[in-house]
Image (spheres, grey):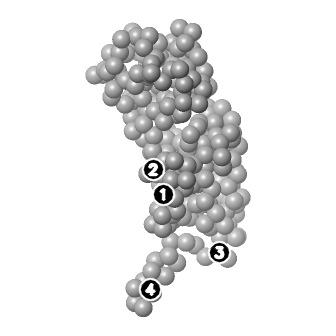
Amino acid sequence: MKSLSITIALLTSIIPPISWAEALPYCPIDLVTTNWAPYYSQKLVKEGFFTEICRTAFARFNCKMNVSFMPWDRAVKGTMKGLYSGVLGIYHSDERAQELAYSRAIYHSEEVLVHFGGIKLNSYSTLEDLKNFTIGTIKGSLHSEEFNQANFLHKYPAQTTLKNIKRIQRGRIELFADSKLVVLDAINKKYPKLRGKLVIIKPPLSRASLYVAISKKVKNHMELIKNLNLAIDSMEHDGTTEKILSDFGFEN
């Protein structure tokens, strides 16, 4: 009986009272992001596993989450200016944190450099080793702080992973930076003939966490973040996050 009382008390502290949650001024919440399969995309079932985790978390405090898809650079810059309420699935940076309030980490991503055998490059020691190559990037993406600030590199941004794959095939770039999981998903679905040619250069550019970030111009944004973090914690505690990942064929 004592253990049951402790369990009930714990769950009560994790999940805000429904009557309070219904009056929250920021709900429903409208988030923006881009198509970035398999994490999130309007073309995926339930708009992807990351979207489903976040939607479930918001629902735990009776807050409906809506998502609009657009180019990534527009989503991030627009939210930093206060044009949108928040961004779904974003990396952290000190610059962004000046305008955005971040949730706790929800999932993770490994940013890598890849090519398809057109150059002889399997590894590098420092970014200086890459200065003679033409490198594709995703516009507005934070591949890594060091990489993004390396102005001596020849970097050419594109809007999507698929565009960078096409640019490599046409000889316009020699390699590109992106999430390892996103590249593998794109090749498996769109370019299966490239599977045997894919070279993932070592080491990764970064191993980064993915968050929800809310514009600091949103009223009571820190209260929203607090409720979201409590919901995410409770989902990990009761196995909901693991169940969603498993349903989509992924693991934590």
Q: Residues within 10 Å of mark 1 (few under 14, many from 20)?
A: some
Q: Residues within 10 Å of mark 4 (few under 14, many from 20)?
A: few
Secondary structure beneath dot 4 equals: helix
Amino acid type indicated by mark 4: Leu
The label shown at residue 242 is 1
Secondary structure beneath dot 2 equals: loop
Please tell me whether residue 215 is drawn above or below residue 113 in the rendered image: below
Comes first in the chain, label 1 or label 4: 4
Count the marks: how many?
4
Q: Position of residue 172 (x, y in %)?
A: 54, 9
Comes first in the chain, label 1 or label 3: 3
Amino acid type indicated by mark 3: Ile
- Residue under pointer 3: 18
- Residue under pointer 2: 251
At horizontal 39% and vertical 38% (from top left) the residue drawn is 207
Amino acid type indicated by mark 2: Glu
Say which of marks 2 and 4 sits in front: 2
Q: Nearer the viewer, residue 95 or 157?
A: 157
Farthest-out residue, bottom:
1
- Residue under pointer 4: 4
Left or right: residue 225 versus residue 202 is: right
Q: CA distance from mark 1 to mark 3?
A: 24 Å
Q: Position of residue 20 (x, y in %)?
A: 65, 74
Q: Position of residue 25 (x, y in %)?
A: 70, 63
Q: Nearer the viewer, residue 130 or 52?
A: 52
Report if the CB atoms under discs 1 and 4 are less than 8 Å apart.
Answer: no
Left or right: residue 251 versus residue 51 is: left
